[in-house]
């Protein structure tokens, strides 16, 4: 069939286009098909196809693939990591997921992606506490604390103790 040919085409732009059409049709009433299409896109090997899948899944990211987003935060492609942050933003991460986001902030090389991750992490008091007590560069912690203050967040005493212990 044409879908099979497009899915196996050597050109990643053709595969991304096939994915786009498949997701547009499936998003309407076939959540299982969305999951299958996204699973294929994430495993495609092409950053173009992977990013297209992540971006097209706005508002319909399957819960079963939620963990894949966190794995993709480590992808070498900045554009994929940016697309992942978009999906995470709409999914409202749990406290544990926010803590994973904080740990990623400590190693994220891109300033814009790191800042967006920090904003997500500030939704969780547990993640804030994790951020101020984890072993990370002082510059990163200062950047995070600056964001917290600019957002008007109040820190609790245990969080402040963590800051004092790290001498930030």
Image (cartoon, rainbow, N blue to C red):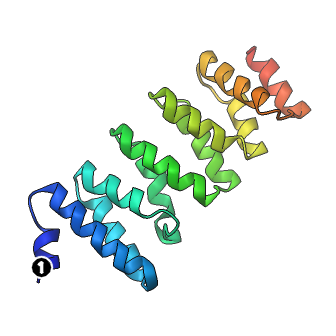
Pinpoint residue 92: horizontal percent, then vertical percent.
Answer: 65, 57
Q: Where 102 sits versus 20, above or below? A: above
Identify the secondary structure beneath mark 1. Answer: helix
Q: Where 57 sits versus 141, above or below? A: below
* Left or right of residue 64: residue 103: right
User: In which quarter of the view is residue 154 placed?
Assistant: top right
Does residue 33 appear in the picture of this structure?
yes
Q: Which residue is pictured at 43% across the width and 51% down the height?
A: 71
Total marks shown come to 1
* Left or right of residue 14: residue 142: right
What is the crowding at mark 1: few (fewer than 14 residues within 10 Å), some, or many (at least 20)? Answer: few
User: In which quarter of the view is residue 38 placed?
Assistant: bottom left
Q: Which residue is mark 1?
A: 2
User: In which quarter of the view is residue 42 placed?
Assistant: bottom left
Check the image and name the residue furthest to the right. 157
Pinpoint residue 20: horizontal percent, then vertical percent.
Answer: 30, 67
Q: Which residue is pictured at 74% across the width and 46% down the height?
A: 124
Q: Where 164 sits versus 28, above or below? A: above
Does residue 73 appear in the picture of this structure?
no
Q: Which residue is pictured at 48% across the width and 62% down the height?
A: 58
Pinpoint residue 66: horizontal percent, then vertical percent.
Answer: 51, 62
Q: Nearer the viewer, residue 16 or 163?
A: 16
Q: Nearer the viewer, residue 29 or 97?
A: 29
* Left or right of residue 97: residue 164: right
Q: Which residue is pictured at 60% across the width and 22% down the height?
A: 140
Q: Where 133 sits versus 57, above or below? A: above
Pinpoint residue 64: horizontal percent, then vertical percent.
Answer: 49, 71
* Left or right of residue 125: residue 116: left
Q: Quadrant of the N terminus?
A: bottom left
Q: Quadrant of the C terminus?
A: top right
């Amino acid at each position: 069939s044409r879908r099979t040919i497009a899915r196996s085409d050597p050109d990643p732009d053709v595969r991304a286009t096939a994915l786009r059409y498949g997701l547009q049709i499936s998003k309407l009433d076939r959540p299982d098909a969305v999951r299958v299409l996204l699973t294929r896109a994430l495993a495609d090997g092409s950053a173009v196809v992977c990013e297209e899948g992540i971006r097209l899944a706005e508002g319909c990211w399957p819960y079963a693939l939620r963990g894949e987003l966190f794995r993709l935060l480590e992808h070498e492609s900045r554009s994929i990591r940016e697309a992942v942050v978009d999906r995470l933003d709409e999914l409202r991460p749990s406290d544990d997921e926010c803590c994973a986001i904080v740990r990623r902030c400590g190693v994220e090389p891109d300033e814009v992606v790191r800042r967006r991750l920090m904003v997500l992490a500030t939704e969780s008091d547990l993640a804030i506490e994790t951020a101020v007590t984890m072993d990370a560069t002082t510059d990163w912690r200062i950047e995070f604390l600056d964001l917290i203050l600019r957002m008007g967040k109040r820190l609790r005493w245990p969080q402040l103790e963590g800051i004092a212990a790290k001498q930030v």
